[in-house]
Amino acid sequence: MPQDIKVKICGLSQPEHVHAAADAGAAYVGFVFFPKSPRNVSIELARDLAVEAPLGLAKVALTVNADDAALDAIMDAVPLDMLQLHGKETPERVAEIRARYGLPVMKAIGISEEADLEQISLYGGVADQLLVDAKAPKGADLPGGNGLSFDWRLVNRKYWPRPWMLAGGLTPDNVALAVQMTGARQVDVSSGVESAPGVKDTALIRAFVQAALA
């Protein structure tokens, strides 16, 4: 497998796991700002993690349907490289956020069937990157991070107007196959490198990155 795969470790809340991600060769780390998530972090903690992150590691803030006040508070305190929108933000809202903060914006889209692929072109015109995740089950508290995967054949050989990242149920055991089946050049993991919900595991982080880059 080519070595130019980029890995994002999301939902980090401990300094040692940020460093473990960097040491393993991850390109991105993600901080979750969503109170319902077991991976939610305060602005103060995210600031400390971001300040301590090794140079060259892209720092991503994951938000869900956040308003300007919430985003302003995050942006004023935390040195970030990208915003990830994981809610039901419209293309217009994505464009607004991108213009307001001047940072690259990644829009998450949920996939479970062919019809969901329409979002690729819908958001591809306004976002800098797309994150393709398994669609959350109806009634789920979390829009992502549920440890669910989808039929990877749905996104194989698709035309992508923007760089994209594969997420949803990835683990050290299946990430190599996922890359092979989809052609993804970027992968995202959160629950797949945890020993319990919200508790990252250094060994699993290392194993995931190694498997993705193998």
Image (tube, helix red, strand yellow):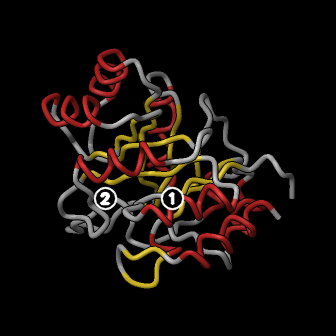
Image x and y of residue 206, in percent:
66, 71
- Mark 2 surroundings within 10 Å by alpha-carbon count, few (fewer than 14), some (14 through 19), many (20 or more): many
Image x and y of residue 83, in percent:
39, 36
- Mark 1 surroundings within 10 Å by alpha-carbon count, few (fewer than 14), some (14 through 19), many (20 or more): many
Circle 1 — which element?
A: helix
Image x and y of residue 62, in percent:
35, 47
Residue drawn at (44%, 39%) of the image: 119
Query: Which residue appears farthest toward the right when viewing the image?
Result: 1
Q: Amino acid at mark 1?
A: Val
Q: Residue 155 vs residue 198: left or right?
A: right
Residue drawn at (21%, 42%) of the image: 65
Q: Amino acid at mark 2?
A: Pro
Q: Residue 173 vs residue 87: left or right?
A: right
Residue corresponding to mark 2:
143
Residue corresponding to mark 1:
18
Are discs 2 and 1 less than 8 Å apart at CB?
no
Circle 2 — which element?
A: loop
